[in-house]
């Protein structure tokens, strides 16, 4: 995996990923940015949410569950002093589908957290991760 970051002015940066996509990041005005894009640490949190959502959907589909939606809301706390690592992250999953089995939803979330989601497993080295979930019948 590769990524190239280029400073584009102010406190804005453009990431070019190895898969050929671009992502903008910017800082707040009080740090010299223009607040035009997410902060770098916001992209870490968003990537973690995307990583676990990807896992959960794949696991549920492989388990032949009729999943039609997956939303993950993350709330993170950071250390007060540098380095301002994440210290706590709570994941709330909202899974939509038909006749979803609660035990399979719970298993998919647990497997992602403990085995498959590289991002959340890395972040668990500095942060306490908690999870809860709900099923929304279709």
Image (cartoon, rainbow, N blue to C red):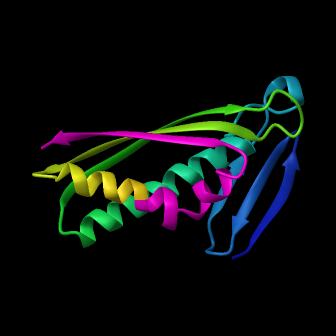
In the drawing, does residue 78 fall left or right of residue 76?
right
Query: Relative to residue 61, is residue 106 depicted above or below?
Result: above
Instruction: Give the percent coordinates (x, y) of residue 59.
Output: 33, 66
Q: Residue at x 34, y 67 (%)?
A: 58
Instruction: Give the percent coordinates (x, y) of residue 63.
Output: 23, 69
In the drawing, does residue 129 fall left or right of residue 109?
right
Q: Quadrant of residue 118?
A: bottom right
Q: Nearer the viewer, residue 121 or 48?
A: 121
Q: Nearer the viewer, residue 47 or 19?
A: 47
In which quadrant will I find the C terminus?
top left
Q: Quadrant of residue 104?
A: bottom left
Q: Is residue 134 magenta?
A: yes
Identify the magenta region. Answer: 111-138
Instruction: Give the percent coordinates (x, y) of residue 134.
Output: 28, 38
Q: Quadrant of residue 64?
A: bottom left
Q: Is residue 59 magenta?
A: no
Q: Residue furthest top?
A: 30
Q: Residue at x 76, y 40 (%)?
A: 26
In which quadrant will I find the N terminus?
bottom right
Query: Relative to residue 117, is residue 46 depicted above or below?
Result: above
């Amino acid at each position: 995996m590769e990524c190239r970051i280029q400073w584009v002015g102010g406190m804005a940066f453009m990431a070019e990923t190895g898969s050929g996509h671009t992502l903008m990041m910017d800082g707040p005005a009080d740090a010299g940015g223009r607040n035009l894009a997410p902060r770098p640490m916001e992209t870490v949190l968003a990537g973690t949410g995307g990583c676990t959502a990807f896992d959960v959907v794949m696991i549920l589909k492989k388990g032949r569950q009729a999943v039609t939606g997956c939303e993950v809301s993350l709330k993170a706390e950071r250390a007060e002093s540098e380095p301002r690592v994440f210290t706590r992250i709570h994941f709330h999953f909202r899974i939509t589908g038909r006749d979803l089995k609660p035990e399979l939803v719970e298993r998919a979330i647990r497997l992602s957290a403990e085995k498959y989601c590289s991002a959340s497993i890395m972040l668990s080295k500095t942060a306490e991760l908690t999870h809860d979930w709900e099923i929304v019948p279709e």
